[in-house]
Amino acid sequence: MSELFSIQLQNRQQQGGDGVWLDLPTTTEQVQVALRQIGISSDNPQGLFISGYFAEEEKRFAISYNMVLASNVDELNFLASRLETLSTGERTELNAALQAPQSELFSIGRITDFPENVDYYVHLPDVHGPAQLGDYYLNRSGMVNMPEEWKGGIDTAQFGRYVAQQEQGAFTQYGYLVKSGDEWQKVHEGQPVPEEYRVLSFPAPEVLRDSANIPPPVQPETEPQKVIPIILNGKDSAERMKEITDRLETGIQELFDSDRYKAYLTTMAKFHNYSFNNTLLIAMQGG
């Protein structure tokens, strides 16, 4: 894939910036590289606009500059891909059609359909004026049947003007153009750009891309808390029961002395009009 023409992309928030040139046809990856260069991401897609159009002389199409600037990246990428299929002669015919007065190629979508409509026109690339057109019809087209000695007395320029007027042809920088009578085939005009030619995808913001590359912190492994069994030293049931009661009282006392119990009391003080059950529920929920 070689470039057919280039468009200049700019960021509205970078006043006075040079922008970046993007060759078309292109790929999503190349578009994202260009967008990053001008500070465009998914955070500020509205800042993107097309500010320029350029093509080498031998590849140049006579497309309206303002028409290109009013289009979008996907439409122009599809257009470049379609025009890439044209032969040299068909490209010259397209340029003649674009330059013709009251050209019917009035939109990017219409131009995109030109490869399906190369027979819509008759194009004479070496005819640029009435005299050449008159000579063509008189001596080369095979449509004028008269003795050769009579042809010498015909004013070819006047004859050419008459022919052009009758068939409503147009003289352009790229030759003479006239409609063939075939019906224009509307294929892509007015339709969404096919998926395979949609290349405009806004890159993630730099901060998000950087954070996405940072591995999550490694959490230290915590060992489960060991359960210490209660060892009773009493010799009989009565001694063991007393030992359990003493330990329970000690645990309760430790609870009363703890910060958790103090927080509970604070909660109760705030909600003294509540029932005990409601206060306990609030305390369990964190106050």
Image: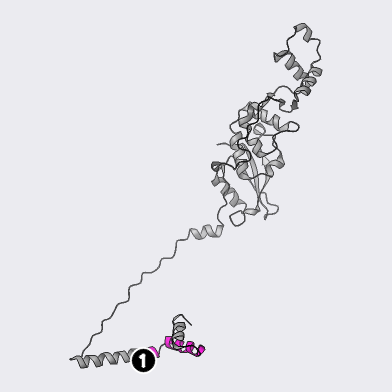
Q: Is residue 18 above or below residue 137?
A: below
Kind of residue at disc 1? Gln
**Prevailing secondary structure class for the magenta stretch in the rendered image:** helix
Residue 161 placed where, x, y %? 80, 21
Q: Does residue 191 appear left or right of residue 131 in this picture?
A: left
Left or right relative to 40: residue 150: right
Q: Is residue 105 magenta?
A: no
Counting the numbered discs, the total is 1
Q: Residue furthest left?
A: 235
Quarter of the picture containing the N terminus is top right
Quick check: 171 above or below 187?
above
Residue at 46%, 89% (x, y): give it.
265
Quarter holding residue 217: bottom left
Q: Residue sitting at 81 percent across and 18 percent down? A: 158
Q: Nearer the viewer, residue 263 or 126?
A: 263
Crowding at mark 1 (Cα within 10 Å: few <14, some 14-19, many 20+): few
Expressed as whole percent of the image width and height from the top left, the position of residue 97 reads: 70, 30
Q: Is residue 260 magenta?
A: yes
**From where the camera sits, is residue 55 visible?**
no
Q: Residue 216: where, in percent of width, then height?
A: 44, 63
Residue, x 62% and y 45% (percent of image)? 73
Q: Give the extent of the magenta segment.
A: 252-272
Foreground: 193 or 39? 193
Query: SS of the residue at dot 1?
Result: helix
Q: Which residue is mark 1?
A: 253
